[in-house]
Amino acid sequence: MTQSAPSEPTATAPAASADSSLSPASSALAAVPRRAPGRVHRAWSVAAVTFVTIIGAAAFASLPGLLIEPLHQEFDWSRGTIGFAVSVNLALYGLTAPFAAALMDRFGIRRVVACALTVIAVGSAATVWMTASWQLVLFWGVLVGLGSGSMALAFAATVTNRWFTARRGLVTGILTAAGASGQLIFLPLLAWLVSEHGWRPAALTVALAALSVVPFVWLLLRDHPADVGLAPYGGTYAAKPAPVPGAARRALTVLFRAARTGPFWLLAGTFAICGASTNGLVKTHFVPAAHDHGMPVTAAAGLLAVIGVFDVVGTVASGWFTDRFAARRLLAVYYALRGVSLLFLPMLLAPSVHPPMVFFIVFYGLDWVATVPPTLALCREIYGEDSAIVFGWVLASHQVGAAVVAFLGGLARDAFGSYDVVWYASGALCAAAALMAMVIRRPRPAAAP
């Protein structure tokens, strides 16, 4: 049980002294302005801007599952080919994240995020003119994948680590839920556009949504509390650290250091299964699977949006639980419940929405990304200052798992005519993840010579 943070965390700069022996650093610290009593800490406004930014960027994550059938019908590309482009997108989304976290330490959050949103807009808009499958891989797979990777959860982790000392679990849950909120906003709209006007207006909508967020990022987001003379929420004032050169080298160094510890592989393995059972499977293949059973695309997309509603509730609640209970036990419970729900899904798919399907959607939505706050908490507990980059690599495994299942799911549908085998396999993987989570332990410090 963690202690509550003070209601008015402020910079704890010492008062100026007439003593001429004060060092320049001490004088600078003494000059740090204090926040007026009663005002909301600036960290919460930064978190709000981050939340809106992730919502705006969430449009791109809502589209892949809606593209499979329209592209298959218009270009006669196989579902495996389309799934491969989606898998490239998901893999780069994860593999870019640790380097993006290091780039934020080098160039600042604002510059990296603004550039990422612009790349997403360019890649999404360029798909309108594609005529070959390799262009889908390039535009949607590579460009949108690289841009979205820089907007990944490592962005939320960096903001949380810099601006918050207290309430980190809660803030992580709120920022993670932003993606679900974006899905809730954009998925019904994009499904309607695809059904009524084709997939091209939907792709342009994604591009415009990404561009519209850039001004908010540039004008309102700040890289560090010291930029505005404040301490982190619940912490004490610290000077802004110098830019860290060699972003790629640092990301790889942190990876090699973490890879020598057992908890890293357990965290990466469980999170790979998390990605396989969410982004790779349900987000990519639920709509076409439901359509195979006669359900209209708009109805299936609406069910995914409802998952987004309960995802917000589940993720914020998970952040609250993470501040109070053992993170590894929470992970074990989340994965076990998810696996059970996936085993029942093939029996629930039908031409229309019925109460058991609604129960699945609510249940699965509460568990959708509830794994993020405890996973990030374990990274922070075990790897300290490198936790954002380590979490970036763990997130990379999440997206690699998602990419593999996005591709294999399309192949399974082409080979067997249904997705049933994929649902059952994912349920079994979630059971394995629950067992892996229970054995995560903090490494013992090396014995003194």
Image (cartoon, rainbow, N blue to C red):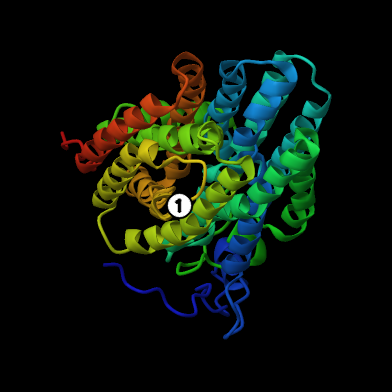
Please provide percent x and percent y for residue 325. Answer: 26, 60
Mark 1: few/some/many CA within 10 Å (<14, 14-19, 20+): few
> Which of these two is toward me, 110 or 332?
332
Q: Residue at x 49, y 52 (%)?
A: 307
Residue that extends furthest to the bottom in the rendered view of this protein: 38
**Kind of residue indicated by mark 1:** His
Q: Relative to residue 144, is residue 152 drawn left or right?
A: left
Q: Residue at x 75, y 43 (%)?
A: 193
Q: Could you tell me if residue 165 is visible in this image?
A: no
Q: Splitting the image into 4 quarters, where does residue 69 fall?
A: top right
Residue at image location 33% in from the left, 35% down from the top: 270
Mark 1 falls on what kind of element?
A: loop
Please state if 429 lies on the left or on the right of 75 as rendered: left
Q: Which residue is mark 1?
A: 354
Tell which of 154 and 307 is nearer to you.
307
Q: Position of residue 226 (x, y in %)?
A: 61, 61
Where residue 15 sits: x, y (%)? 54, 79
- Can you say whether 57 is above or below 285 in the image? below
Whether residue 274 is situated above or below residue 156 in the rendered picture: above
Q: Nearer the viewer, residue 173 or 366?
A: 366
Quarter of the image that includes the N terminus = bottom left
Against 22, residue 16 (above or below) is below
Quarter occupied by the C terminus: top left
Residue reaching furthest to the right: 129
